[in-house]
Image (cartoon, rainbow, N blue to C red):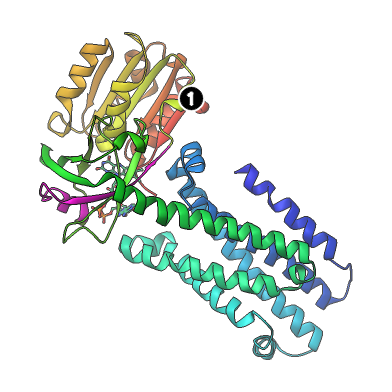
Amino acid sequence: MSGLAGGAVPVVGLWLVQAEPSVRLDAVFATAAHLGGLLAGYGILVMLLLMARVPAIEHGVGADLLARWHARGGRCVLSLCLAHTVLALCAYAAHTGIDLLSAAIDLMGYPGLVAATAGLALLAGVGVTSARAVRRRVRHETWRAVHLLTYSGAGLAFAHQLAGPDLVGGPLAAWLWTMLHTTVGVLLVWYRLVVPVRQALRHSLRVIEVRSESPDVVSVVMQGLALDALRAEPGQFFRWRFLDRRLWRTSLPFSLSAPVRGDTLRITVKACGDHTRRIRRLRPGVRVLATGPFGALTAHRRTRRKVLLLAGGVGITPMRTLFETLPGDPGDLTLLYRAGSADQLVLRQELEAIAGERGAALHFLLGPSDGPFDPLAPRALRNLVPDLHEHDVYLCGPPGMSRAAVTALARAGVPSSRIHTEQFTF
Ligand SMILES: Cc1cc2nc3c(=O)[nH]c(=O)nc-3n(C[C@H](O)[C@H](O)[C@H](O)COP(=O)(O)OP(=O)(O)OC[C@H]3O[C@@H](n4cnc5c(N)ncnc54)[C@H](O)[C@@H]3O)c2cc1C
C-alpha cells in the first residue's frame, strides 16, 4: 500500500512543476483544484488496480484486505473528486465574477466537462450504494451491478483528465498518464475476463456430489480437467458460479475445504442466505465456473515451526486444508475449532483422522459465545497451547470471534505480524 501511496509523489511533482504561484483568489482555487483533480485521477487508477485480481497483488495482500483498502480508498477518491469540482467551480466564478450556478453552466461548454460531470455522477452513485447503511439494505447483486458503473465513471473521468490543463500542457505527462491507464485497463480485461473464460474452457468443472455435513452445511465436490494447472494452494478460495437456473447470476467466494485431489475440488458451504441455501439443492452434473485461486492465507505466511490454526464456525474450511497440508512434525500443529455446540462441528471425522495421522493437537471449543467461560481468553489459550508465543497463528472465523481472538492472542504474547487472518466478508 505504501508503494501505491508513494505513486502519488510524482503526481504532486507534476502539479508542482506546472503550478504558478499567485495570491489571486481565482488562481489559488484553480491551483488547488488541479492538485485535487490529479490526485483523484491517480486514486481512481489505484482503486481499479486493487480490484483487477492481479495474482501477485491478490496472493501478496489477500482479497479481504484488498477489498477493505479499496473501500477506504474509494471514499478518499470520491472526496477528492468532489473537492476538485467545487474548487474548479469557485476558481471559474472568482475569475469571471459570476455566481456558482452560472459558472457551472458556462463550464459545460469546455472540452471534457460534460463527460467529467457524468463520470462524477456515476462515481457518486457507486459511493452512495457502498455506504455501510445503504449497502446493508441492498442485495449484493444490486450493489455489484451499480459498482460496475465505476468503469464508465473512470473512462469518462479519464477523457476529462486528458483535456485538463496539467496533462494537455505536457505531452510527456499525457503519454505517461495514458500508458498507466492502458496498463491497468489491460490488467482488468486480462484477469477479470480472459483468465476466467480460459479457466472455464480448460477445466470443464461439474458438480459430482453434494454431501450433507450438518443441518445447515453441505460439501460440494466438483470434478474437472487439468486441475493441477490451477496451482491452488491450501487456504485459498475461488469465486464459484454454478450454472444452475437459480444460481448462475452470481459468483460466490468459498475456500477449498480439502486440497486439490487428482481431478476433484471440494468446498463446504454454510447456508446463511438465499444463494447458499440454494447450493444444498444443487444436482450432480451442474456445470461450474471457478475463478481463482485467490487469497493469501497460505503456507507462505508462515514464519515459525509451530503453527496454531484457530477456526470459528464455517471458518474451518481453509483451516481443514491447512491442517492436512502444512509441513510439520508431530507436535508442531494445533487446531482449535470454536463452535456453539457439538452438532455444529463439521468435517469432524476428517479432522480427527488428520490429527491422529500427523500427531497434531485438536481441540473443540464448544459453548455459546455469550457463555460464562470464554475459551478464547488469553489464559484459556495459554492452557491449551503453553508455548503460544512461539507459534504462527492462522485465524478464520466470524468477525466478532476474530476480533476477540486477535486481542486475546496479542495479550497472550503473539505479535500481530504472526497472526494471519482471513475474513469471510468483503
Ligand atoms: C474469501 C471468502 C471465503 C469464504 N469461504 C467460505 C466457505 O468456505 N464456506 C462458507 O460457507 N462461506 C464462505 N464464505 C462466505 C460466503 O461467501 C457467503 O456466506 C456467501 O457469499 C453468502 O451468500 P448468500 O447469498 O447466501 O447470503 P446473503 O445473505 O445474500 O449475503 C450475506 C453476505 O455475504 C456477502 N455476499 C453475498 N453474496 C456475495 C458474493 N457474490 N460475493 C461476495 N460476498 C457476498 C455479502 O457481504 C452479504 O452481506 C467466504 C467468503 C469469503 C469472502
The answer to which quarter of the image holds residue 373 is top left
Residue at 18% x, 23% y is 350
Position of residue 279 relative to residue 325, above or below, is below
Q: Position of residue 291 (x, y in %)?
A: 34, 48
Answer with left or right where residue 186 lies relative to residue 247.
right
Answer with left or right where residue 145 lies relative to residue 210.
right
Position of residue 261 relative to residue 247, above or below, is above
Answer with left or right where residue 368 lies relative to residue 307.
left
**Which amino acid type corresponds to the residue marked 1 in the rendered image?**
Arg
Q: As rendered, which of 383 and 36 lies closer to the eye?
A: 36
Count all numbered tags in the image, as a single digit.
1
Position of residue 24 relative to residue 364, above or below, is below
* In magenta stretch: residue 335: no
The answer to which quarter of the image holds residue 388 is top left
Q: As rendered, which of 238 and 363 lies closer to the eye?
A: 238
Q: As rendered, which of 29 and 375 lies closer to the eye?
A: 29
Q: Mark 1 points at which residue?
A: 418
* In magenta stretch: residue 278: yes
- Crowding around mark 1 (Cα neighbors within 10 Å: few <14, some 14 to 19, many 20+) is many
Q: Can residue 216 be seen in this view?
A: no
Residue at 76% x, 73% y is 165
Residue at 36% x, 47% y is 425
Q: Quadrant of the N terminus?
A: top right
The answer to which quarter of the image holds residue 324 is top left
Q: What element carries label 1?
A: helix
Q: Can residue 240 be seen in this view?
A: yes
Q: Where is residue 146 in the image (x, y as percent from the top left)?
A: 40, 68
Q: Where is residue 258 in the image (x, y as percent from the top left)?
A: 25, 31
Q: What stretch is highlighted in magenta?
A: 275-295
